[in-house]
Image (tube, rainbow, N blue to C red):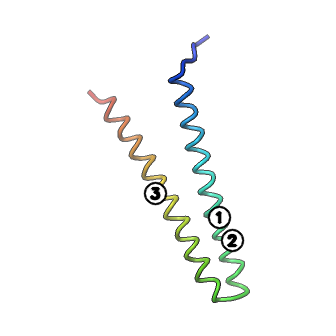
Amino acid sequence: MAEIDLGFLARQNERILAELGNIREELALHSATIARLDHTVTSQSSADALMLAEMRAIRSQVARLVDRINRVEDRVEEIRP
């Protein structure tokens, strides 16, 4: 059986926390989209504010993806000779 060290546990914990952050951002994005669509049907004035909330959620999601890509690129650079 493989031994589990603190480094392994730390990496697993980091992966779980990153995934939790992704799930939260997905939820925020979908909630903002649904709220906008729901209010678009009922009133146009609140639809603009909801569109802004949706755009902020998308921007946050993209920023997190960019951070993840940068971390992967850093790891690749560490591995390369």
Q: Amino acid at mark 1?
A: His
Q: Position of residue 15 (x, y in %)?
A: 55, 37
Residue wearing tag 2: 34
Identify the image quadrant of the N terminus.
top right
Tag 1 near tag 2, CB within 8 Å: yes
Q: Amino acid at mark 3?
A: Ala
Callout 2 secondary element? helix
Residue wearing tag 1: 30
Callout 3 secondary element? helix
Which image quadrant is residue 31 in?
Answer: bottom right
Q: Residue at x 53, y 71 (%)?
A: 55
Residue wearing tag 3: 63
* Neighbours of disc 3 within 10 Å: few (<14), some (14-19), many (20+): few
Q: Position of residue 71 (x, y in %)?
A: 41, 42
Q: Is residue 31 left or right of residue 52?
A: right
* Neighbours of disc 1 within 10 Å: few (<14), some (14-19), many (20+): some
Tell me which label, 1 or 3, sits earlier in the chain.
1
Query: Which mark is nearer the camera, 1 or 3?
Result: 3
